[in-house]
């Protein structure tokens, strides 16, 4: 049976990618003073690393109920790195807090839905 992790958790990670890139472009466009006055290239490289990790974690999410894959753990790493990006762009602390809550809720509900579907089957 198919797991709900790719649908629910994957959507959070993909939405995160858009928000991160928009935050980088907004910060650069508004000339927000970042730690060490980073250039646009440095900001985009950091956002790209975060994006690659998020995409890899989406690919590694469990596809079947009961399957153990490292996608969820890697998703938590992405959340921690997003929180750490707040040291570069301070508004990212608030955004990261929102996404951490969303990630925790989707992981919980995905696991719960998978458990209930497995019990019914």
Image (cartoon, rainbow, N blue to C red):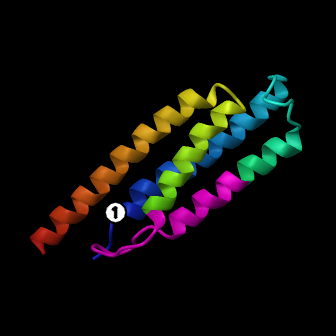
Say if the magenta span includes residue 59. Answer: yes
Say if the magenta span includes residue 38. Answer: no
Task: Identify the residue shown where x is 45% and y is 67%.
Answer: 61
Task: Identify the residue shown where x is 48% and y is 57%.
Answer: 10
Task: Identify the residue shown where x is 73% and y is 53%.
Answer: 48
- Residue 45 location in percent, x, y? 80, 50
Quadrant showing the N terminus? bottom left
- Residue 8 location in percent, x, y? 40, 55
Q: Which residue is mark 1?
A: 4
Residue placed most toward the observer, 70 or 54: 70
Q: Residues within 10 Å of mark 1 (few under 14, many from 20)?
A: many
Lateral position of residue 80 relative to residue 39, left or right:
left
Lateral position of residue 36 relative to residue 97, left or right:
right
Numbered label tally = 1
Q: Using the rendered view, name the quadrant where residue 26 is placed.
A: top right
- Residue 15 location in percent, x, y? 55, 46
Residue placed most toward the observer, 75 or 120: 75
In magenta, the rendered stretch is 49-71
Above/below status of 31 relative to 80: above
Lateral position of residue 40 relative to residue 16, left or right:
right
Residue extending furthest left?
A: 120
Task: Identify the residue shown where x is 79% and y is 28%.
Answer: 34
Q: Using the rendered view, name the quadrant where residue 96 is placed.
A: top right
Question: SS at mark 1?
Answer: loop
Quadrant showing the C terminus? bottom left
- Residue 33 location in percent, x, y? 81, 23
Lateral position of residue 32 relative to residue 93, left or right:
right
């Amino acid at each position: 049976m198919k797991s709900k992790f790719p649908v629910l958790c994957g959507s959070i990670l993909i939405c995160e990618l858009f928000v991160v890139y928009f935050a980088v472009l907004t910060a650069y466009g508004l000339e927000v003073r970042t730690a060490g006055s980073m250039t646009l290239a440095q900001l985009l490289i950091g956002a790209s690393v975060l994006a690659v990790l998020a995409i890899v974690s989406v690919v590694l999410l469990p596809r079947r109920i009961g399957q153990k894959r490292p996608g969820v753990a890697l998703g938590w790493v992405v959340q921690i790195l997003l929180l750490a990006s707040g040291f570069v762009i301070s508004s990212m602390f608030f955004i990261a807090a929102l996404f951490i809550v969303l990630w925790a809720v989707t992981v919980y509900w995905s696991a719960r839905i998978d458990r209930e579907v497995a019990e019914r089957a």
